[in-house]
Image: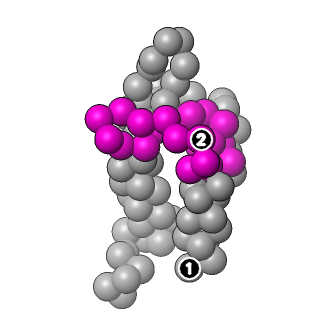
């Protein structure tokens, strides 16, 4: 659960400067790199393979918060052998 707590704190810190689309929080590359602790190149690979949906606005890449949550859940389950940690 520490990882989720860490992500919640990171999201809270990022929420001070909110970018919104249709009432949903948008995260940019820097926000997501910090949240997932990955490089920009890794995010580019996730986009290219279609694993992580994204929006491009004014030549800047954004990710919907709901898409990021789905991505985290799916990849977290892959690392745990496909088991749902809550229902295990």
Coloration mode: one colour
In depth, the one of 23 and 57 nearer the eye is 23
Looking at the picture, does residue 78 appear above or below residue 3? above
Q: Which residue is mark 2?
A: 17
In percent of the image, x 52 and y 41: which residue is there? Answer: 18
Q: Quadrant of the N terminus?
A: bottom right
Q: Secondary structure at mark 2?
A: loop
Q: Position of residue 41 (x, y in %)?
A: 66, 30
Residue at the outermost top position: 59
In percent of the image, x 41 and y 61: which residue is there? Answer: 73
Q: Quadrant of the C terminus?
A: bottom left
In percent of the image, x 56 and y 50: which residue is there? Answer: 15
In primary-sequence order, the first of circles 1 and 2 is: 1
Q: Position of residue 77 (x, y in %)?
A: 42, 66
- Judge left or right: residue 81 versus residue 34: left
Residue 54 part of the magenta segment: no
Q: Position of residue 75 (x, y in %)?
A: 45, 57
Mark 1 to mark 2 CA distance (whole Å): 26 Å
**Residues in magenta?**
14-36
Residue 22 part of the magenta segment: yes
Give the number of the mark in front: 1 or 2. Answer: 2
- Judge left or right: residue 24 versus residue 28: left
Q: Position of residue 58 (x, y in %)?
A: 50, 12
In depth, the one of 25 and 17 nearer the eye is 17
Q: Label 2 crowding class (10 Å Cα cut-off): few <14, some 14-19, many 20+?
A: few
Q: Label 1 crowding class (10 Å Cα cut-off): few <14, some 14-19, many 20+?
A: few
Q: Which mark is residue 71?
A: none
Q: Which residue is mark 1?
A: 1
Looking at the picture, does residue 72 appear above or below residue 9? above
Residue 79 in view here: yes
Determine the image quadrant of residue 7.
Answer: bottom right
């Amino acid at each position: 659960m520490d990882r989720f707590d860490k992500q919640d704190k990171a999201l809270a810190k990022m929420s001070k400067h909110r970018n919104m689309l249709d009432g949903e929080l948008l995260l940019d590359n820097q926000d997501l790199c910090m949240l997932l602790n990955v490089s920009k190149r890794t995010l580019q690979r996730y986009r290219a393979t279609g694993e992580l949906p994204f929006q491009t606005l004014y030549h800047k890449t954004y990710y919907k918060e709901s898409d990021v949550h789905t991505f985290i859940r799916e990849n977290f389950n892959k690392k745990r052998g496909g088991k749902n940690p809550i229902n295990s």
